[in-house]
Image (tube, rainbow, N blue to C red):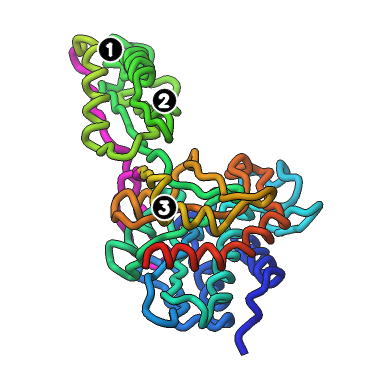
Amino acid sequence: MPKDPGFENAIAFAQDLIRIPSLSGKEGEVARRILLEMNELGYDKTWIDGLGNAIGVVKGTDGGPTVMLNCHMDVVAEGDHSAWEYPPFAAEVVDGFLHGRGSMDIKGQLALQTYAAAALREQAPGDVVVAHTVFEERGGWGMEYLLENKEVEPAAVIIGEATAGDITTGHRGRAEVEVVISGLAGHASAPERARNALDLVPGVLGGIGDLSGRQRQDPVLGAASLVATGIDILPESRNVVPDEAVVVLDWRVLPGSTDEESLEEVREVLIQSVGEMPEGLSVEVRMAKETQTAYTGHTELRDLYTPGFLMDAEDPVILAAAAAVGRRSGEGAAAVRPWTFATDGGWSQGVFGIPTLGFAPGEERFAHTNRERLDVEEARWAFSRHTDLILAVQRALG
């Protein structure tokens, strides 16, 4: 007999997952644990793809539209354990909250989705795919790989990032940009022999400040935002004039922005703010890249870029989802709004054009903090709404 797909078992499963550290590129043990649970719950098919995404299918009854539930398996680093009120990997339930790294970003919701799909065995008209992805915290490589390689082909995607029970319709994208100032290193005792890369930093920061003050606006998502978040110096020795200074920019971009258009905006503003380039110094603007290695061994040099997206609040799928979920307190449809942070939905809808929405318990303010927690009663309510949500989305698509 398959395991009972009830809420208490889902919370116990979430606790098991929280106890397994899973930084980006190290999700293998979590993926295998997820497949074990899917198999015990009676999923019709389960597998791990070439990049390490954990995927399961609960088959539909009559060939209706496929809906995919998605969370990510990676978490951010926990930092100093002594700074946590509760140990980050103990997965304790105290005062009505499930505590720990990943409790609400996103292993608690991952467990709920995994169990919600199992509860729809022999009930959903279309397949319910559950695909939990790798590398979401570092640009969304898992979701891009999943859809690009057609491991699954859903008609709609429900993302389990925290929404506090609302229906979310999109978010700004995120680009990590580098302004690289190059010069000539030299001993600090003879600075006249060097070309100090730091000399151009004030002009660069001034230009970025100017550009940040005139970002595009969206009536739903608000303004794009641009801010310098760090300066990396090479060489790092304090008695050496550096020949390289890299100013790191975090740019929250609106849907429709492209890599090259964004980079060109920075280049143009720097021409004005830096002025005539001193001899021996140069400036390059580029998208930050990172060599990422999946736990399966696959390696790729990737831009640190997550696309944005925005669904129409009047889209039939969104209206059906909001009506099906309702409000936890009071009557009427769920509130509809965007997220403030980026998700894998930027790939599913923003790049691949698949209708995508978010629904899950959890408060955004606890994400990536040492106070991370998930309200158990809110999670219980959200779990109870998943069946109606999935069925409503399938009907809207059909």
Tell me if mark 1 has few (under 14), some (14-19) or many (20+) residues whose alpha carbon lies within 10 angstroms of its own.
Answer: some
In terms of secondary structure, what is the magenta stretch mainly? strand
Mark 1–mark 3 CB contact (< 8 Å): no
Three-letter amino acid code at disc 1?
A: Ser
Q: Please, what is the three-letter code of the amino acid marked with disc 3? A: Asp
Q: CA distance from mark 3 to mark 2?
A: 24 Å
Residue 262 seen by the camera: yes
Residue extending farthest front: 332
Q: Residue placed at 37% from the left, 21% from the top?
A: 212
The image quarter containing residue 251 is top left
Give the residue type at disc 2.
Ala
| Magenta residues, start to end | 279-307
Can I make out residue 187 in this image? no
Residue furthest out toward the right? 95
Mark closer to the chain start, 1 or 3: 1
Instruction: Say if the magenta span includes residue 294.
Output: yes
Q: Which residue is mark 1?
A: 273
For label 3, count other residues whose C-alpha is less than 10 Å away and answer few (under 14), some (14-19) or many (20+): many
Question: Closer to us: mark 3 or mark 2?
Answer: 3
Q: Is residue 53 left or right of residue 385?
A: left
Residue 17 circle label: none
Residue 261: image location, x then y, percent? 22, 32
- Residue placed under numbered mark 3 in the picture: 344
Ranked by sequence position, the earlier of labels 1 and 2 is 2
Circle 1 or circle 3, nearest the eye: 3
Rounded to the nearest angstrom, the CA distance separating label 1 from label 2 is 15 Å
| Residue 284 drawn in magenta | yes
Q: Nearer the viewer, residue 159 or 74?
A: 159
Q: Mark on residue 228?
A: 2
- Residue closest to the eye, 332 or 180: 332
